[in-house]
Amino acid sequence: MSAPPLRAEGLGLQLGGRRVLDGVSLTLQPGQWVAVVGPNGAGKSTLLSLLAGLRTPDAGRVWLRGRALGTLSARERAQALAWLSQQGEAEGDIAVHDVVRLGRLPRHGLFGAPDASDEAAVQAALAETETLAFARRRLNELSGGERQRVLLARALAVRAPVLLLDEPTTHLDAPHQRAVLRGLAARARQGAAVMAVLHDLTLALAADRVLVMDQGRIVADGAPADPALRAALAQVFEHAFSIEALTVAGQPRWAVVPAL
């Protein structure tokens, strides 16, 4: 039996005298996209940074495709795992196409020459994020939402089997949020393991699986249709909303309605 794309056991981290992550264990499966939700300060972004190897936990371990994350070279890790930061760098006098092309560096290396397959991956990522129309423009000419889509395109261009995305829909309008979620679902159907931190709970409840975090721990983990998952979600947000069942195109969906 092959190892899961990503697995973590007992992850913990203390920052500034506070335990921001406490005994978190999880396994990401291929073909599944997972939303991570929770109140501010729950540890969501910290968890993703540990899974991506950007921080080192003071407890627990992470395995990427069956290998301890710390034993992989930077290039091996970058080939297997693509990362989108919540506050990614998206400034400067550099063309959009060249930013997205950076996603192919793990494959051909800093001194290697990109080939036709690299360019195909770049073009596909630009098309998927609807950034192809301004691929020759400079980052400093773009709006916040346009820059966010460029950074997402860079992550998608890696074509890694694991995608970790921290707030990928930030600054995006409704049509582009929909495009991002459809893209994540499509990547999962192609066999990738996708994890995304989302603040929009209605969007999160469109995922295959939802992790609910609170005070540095995972307090619920399940499908959106699971009543226990929805009850835990409402509880950690102090019942500030209700979760209503809908039927869209014959499929069950869930909508979050603020309790005003």
Image: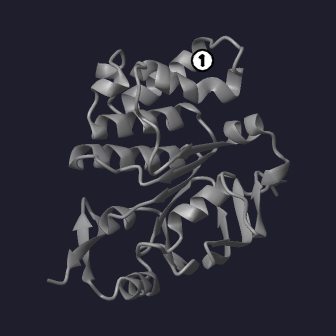
Residue 103 horizontal side relative to residue 111, left or right: left
Q: On the image, which quarter does residue 167 sit in?
A: bottom left
Look at the image and name its color scheme. Answer: one colour
Identify the residue at horizontal 23%, vertical 45% (top origin): 175
Identify the residue at horizontal 60%, vertical 46% (top origin): 191
Furthest-front residue in this view: 16
Compared with 3, 94 (above or below) is: above
Of 103 and 57, the residue lying toward us:
57
Compared with 234, 77 (above or below) is: above
Q: On the image, which quarter does residue 46 sit in?
A: bottom right
Which quadrant of the figure contains the C terminus? bottom left
Q: Which residue is mark 1?
A: 117
Residue 233 on image: x %, y %: 40, 81
Q: How many marks?
A: 1
- At mark 1, the secondary structure is helix
Residue 12 on image: x %, y %: 69, 73
Residue 155 on image: x %, y %: 52, 37
Residue 28 on image: x %, y %: 64, 61
Residue 141 horizontal side relative to residue 198, left or right: left
Of 240 and 125, the residue lying toward us:
240
Identify the residue at horizontal 29%, vertical 47% (top origin): 171
Which quadrant of the figure contains the N terminus? bottom right
Q: Is residue 225 visible?
A: yes
Compared with 97, 35 (above or below) is: below
Packing grade of label 1 (10 A; few <14, some 14-19, many >=20) is few
Instruction: Identify the amino acid type marked 1.
Output: Ser
Q: On the image, which quarter does residue 16 sit in?
A: bottom right
Q: Is residue 68 visible?
A: no
